Amino acid sequence: MKINWYPDEIKTSLLDVDLDQLKKEEIKAIICDVDNTLCTHDALVISDEKKAWIRKAQDLGLKVILISNNHGGRIQKIADDLGCQAYGFSLKPLPHTYMKILKKNHLKREQVICIGDQLFTDIWGAKGMKLRNIYVRPISEADIFYTRLSRKIENRILKERL
Ligand SMILES: [Mg+2]
């Protein structure tokens, strides 16, 4: 059997994700990447538009859960400001953290959507767990060295779809 490793959906930005539609589809939680999805790499500041997007999700009753491979302290600080749960050092695309999130929040797979800007971590992590996923274009082109390398390969894979 051939595995489809492409994202389920591709959007330009997190802000293009239609929260009312997710609510209609009975999604209960959004597992959201931080770096280059919510803010630029290593930043602590979230734009007002993205804050408003998160607030709207929460008002609709959708949990926003931040997940990052970056160090936990910073992710926790961002999450505290936004009233979200945080999972740093998540080792995406490994399933461990996703499983922890589902269990802790009593979520079924079909109630969750994952959003992120990297194919090899965010999307493949979600796919490995059979979770719905949306790939968003990175906020900034300024990535750390490792990400720059993987980004080149990802862009080649995604080329036909973007
Ligand atoms: Mg990212």
Image (spheres, helix red, strand yellow):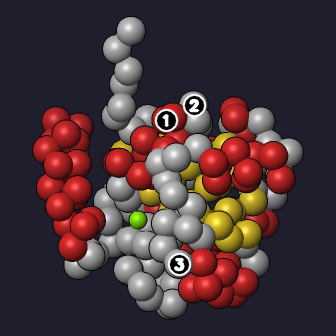
Q: CA distance from mark 2 to mark 3?
A: 26 Å
Residue 109 percent across, percent down from the top left:
70, 35
Between 46 and 69, the residue placed more toward the observer is: 69
Compared with 76, 35 (above or below) is above
Residue 111 percent across, percent down from the top left:
72, 39
Q: Are marks 1 and 2 in contact (CB under 8 Å)?
A: yes
Q: Counting other residues with Cα less than 10 Å from the Cα at mark 1, is it few (<14), some (14-19), or many (20 or more)?
A: many
Residue linked to disc 1? 127
User: Could you tell me which residue is drawn at 44 percent across and 78 percent down?
Assistant: 39
Q: Quadrant location of the C terminus?
A: top left
Between 10 and 77, the residue placed more toward the observer is: 77
User: Could you tell me which residue is drawn at 17 percent across and 61 percent down?
Assistant: 149
Q: Counting other residues with Cα less than 10 Å from the Cα at mark 3, is it few (<14), some (14-19), or many (20 or more)?
A: few
Q: Amino acid at mark 1?
A: Lys
Q: Which mark is residue 71?
A: 3
Q: Secondary structure at mark 2?
A: loop
Residue linked to disc 2? 130
Q: Amino acid at mark 3?
A: His
Compared with 15, 45 (above or below) is below
Compared with 4, 101 (above or below) is below
Q: Quadrant location of the N terminus?
A: top left
User: Could you tell me which residue is drawn at 16 percent across and 36 percent down?
Assistant: 160
